[in-house]
Amino acid sequence: MMMVCTSVPHESAPLHVTGRAPYTDDIPEPAGTLHAALGLSPLAHGRLISIDLERLRAQPGVVAVLTADDVPAENNIGPLAHDDPILAHGELRYLGQPVFAVIATTRDAARRAAALAPQVIQAEALPARLNALEAHAAGEYVVPPMHLARGDATGALARAPLRLQGEWQLGGQEQFYLEGQISFAMPQEGGTALLLHCSTQHPSEMQQLVAHALGWGSHRISVQCRRMGGGFGGKESQSAAFACVASIAALRLGHPVKLRVDRDDDFLITGRRHPFHYRWDVGFDADGRILAAEVDLISNAGHSADLSAPVMARALCHFDNAYWLPNLSLHGYSARTHTQSNTAFRGFGGPQGALAIEMILDSVARRLRLDPLLVRERNFYAQGQDITPYGQRVQELHAQSLAKRLSYSSHYAERRAEIAAFNARSPVLKRGIAFTPVKFGISFNVAFLNQAGALVHVYADGSVLVNHGGTEMGQGINTKVAQVVAHELGVPLSSVRCSATDTAKVANTSATAASTGADLNGKAAQAAAQVIKARLTSLASEKLGSARVSFVNGVVHGNGRNMPFSELVRLAYLRRIQLWSDGFYTTPGLSWDKDKLQGHPFYYYAWGGAVVEAVVDTLTGETRILQADLLHDVGASLNPAIDIGQIEGGFVQGLGWLTSEELVWDTQGRLRTHAPSTYKIPTANDCPPVLKVELFGAANSADTIHRSKAVGEPPLLLAFAGLLAIKDACAACGPIGCDPPLTAPATPEAVLRAIDSVAV
Ligand code: MTE
Ligand code: MOS
């Protein structure tokens, strides 16, 4: 039986659905466990004068209060630039910044004391910059501006027969992992070592940052994560503040310390998807072919660099999406503001880059009164026009066939005609339809991060334990890696298990991010399994008397005879043959010049396409997605059921970003939308009543694990078609050729504004 390319259930499915899957907060608390809570800055910008520690220490249940002065070594959680303090020191940089930590006997006592922050923090308010455009005007950036150029954009713009300019804004997005940020630190060996349970996509970085904060070698700290209740990029770098505070407190007090953040505090403390603002200038011909574009992309990075530089780099490298853009000049500015530090979120800047060209193409099509699908097709990468602005050749040109297949299967043309007829007779409800493609580069832009390790143990009874550097956040990496190992060793999936990610097992791991988890760790685990299989094969050949042996479903065959895999393993053990191995994988052929933004940053591309239909109530601005037809490229899927789940989840999460999830800060810099009461993520009810998902089906032309493709992030971009369908419906309120200035998220207010400005 094939173990890969099979829809086996997620390894934790029964535990998930019965509520028995243990998350970090479910780990039994040893006697003496203390709880931490964070006191947050009440100001968006200020100079810290003092903290009334005596008052905090006098609160019921409080055991200790920690400030920046209690950080034993480096007070930093900045993953790239060392510019982000664990606890505020001197300057208050955003409203919600952790200033002190209260450690108490119960979580409730800790939170009650921490809530006194506005009373106990004495600070001088300073002018706060809350707006990214103001920061841009003042030249305030967290990293130097980045430029990606090809050809002669200025000249080609001047020569273009037609030209359009515009400005557009796109909101941020909260990761809203259902399990909030949490760390549980347990001193070991009389306080000379530390075990940290942390809900994180990046155990190795937590290990390093905690080590730096403590002034320890990494070998004294092990970080474990069995599973997360979602990460979505929010637990790449931003689990560090909680990891560091819990660790410092645990070692200081000699007790286990747990820090589980309340949802509202999680919103106030951590950053999210970068909001972007665009200023664009595009030149094109009468057929809608793009000749040149110059675009400023201004992101709101928040108060520190965090991952803003690589997020902007990915935005710039995804601006082309599926299109050949001969002359291009992109400028990326990561503006510094006094808000939470923005970070990774599914797509990592890619969506913010690609959506910009989709909005521009939509405006071009409306200006020319052409079907936007036709304009898109005319601009697709094609033979001879297949080099990206950053110099990489696009090996597979799937956009054409995706668009063709999808427009046929979704009846795009018929439905467009039918929608026009509906709109002509419907004064209040207006419908719209849109197609958008996706081309998403797979690999970390930074070449060295594309490495992974795994350990495979075959026990003497023939059962198999796998440990790899990836983390499980619901996306099914452990299921896929177990499938790969079961396939390699020819054993049933039931005899393979993946254990918790642990920095004490596989060292120096990369974040489970950039959708590369299964690609990298699957290959590493395969390599480990192959080493063991080679050793077992020699023994099997000898025992079965055949040079050719095969391992199938727990039985080893050769020479017309066979023996159970477990029997072979037992004999191997008695022969003193090593039954476990490590495996290591690095993605081949990558190069990247991060100053020039040129090279071959991606091993391959994942493709997709969506046709989405929406209806708008023009009196209230409310919208509904009526139907979505998704066609997505996962190569030869390792597990179609899991991949379809990722496509559906990514799409609906993208719809939430672009329609209902609105972040509002008041003039004081206080995030007003910091709970589900005010911040609206999509629910099951927001899932379109007709949602069809099809897998594209072509094997990956790159040599990935069983020719599969990464699936974690790319499907989020399929939701672009939802936003553009809503825009299309708004356009039905105005004259032919009008271009409604719909911003994202397309909340009812945004929809009404767009309609008002085009309605006749
Ligand atoms: N799926 C679930 N259920 N939960 C998550 O947190 N994170 C997404 C995606 N799918 C996420 C998810 C993000 S941001 C990434 S980068 C990938 O999963 C990471 O996992 P992978 O590399 O194994 O696909
Ligand atoms: Mo995903 S944003 O790369 O964690």
Image (tube, grey):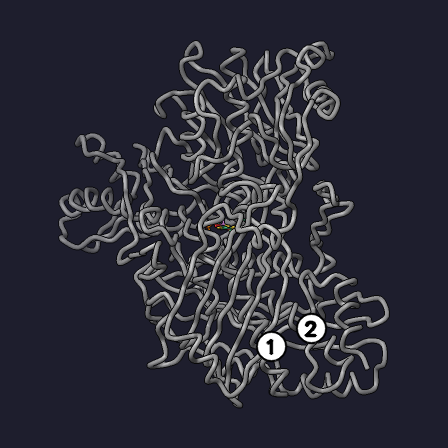
How many numbered discs sit on the rendered protein? 2
- Residue in the picture at 59% in, 16% down: 33
- Residue in the picture at 40% in, 58% down: 442
Tell me the residue that label 2 is attached to.
727
Do tag 1 and tag 2 residues touch (Cβ < 8 Å)?
A: yes
Element type at marker 2? helix
Residue 454 at x, y = what percent? 33, 40
* Amino acid residing under circle 1: Asp
- Residue in the picture at 46% in, 47% down: 143
User: Is residue 760 rendered to the left or right of residue 61?
Assistant: right
- In front of the other: 91 or 648: 91
Residue 476 at x, y = what percent? 49, 48
Tell me the residue that label 1 is attached to.
362
Residue 675 at x, y = what percent? 73, 42
Q: Using the rendered image of the protein, determine whether residue 398 is visible from the camera's viewpoint.
A: no
Q: Using the rendered image of the protein, determine whether residue 714 is visible from the camera's viewpoint.
A: yes
Residue 740 at x, y = what percent? 71, 75
Q: Quadrant of the N terminus?
A: bottom left
Q: Are there few (<14), some (14-19), or many (20+) residues within 10 Å of tag 2?
A: many
User: Is residue 175 rendered to the left or right of residue 708?
Assistant: right
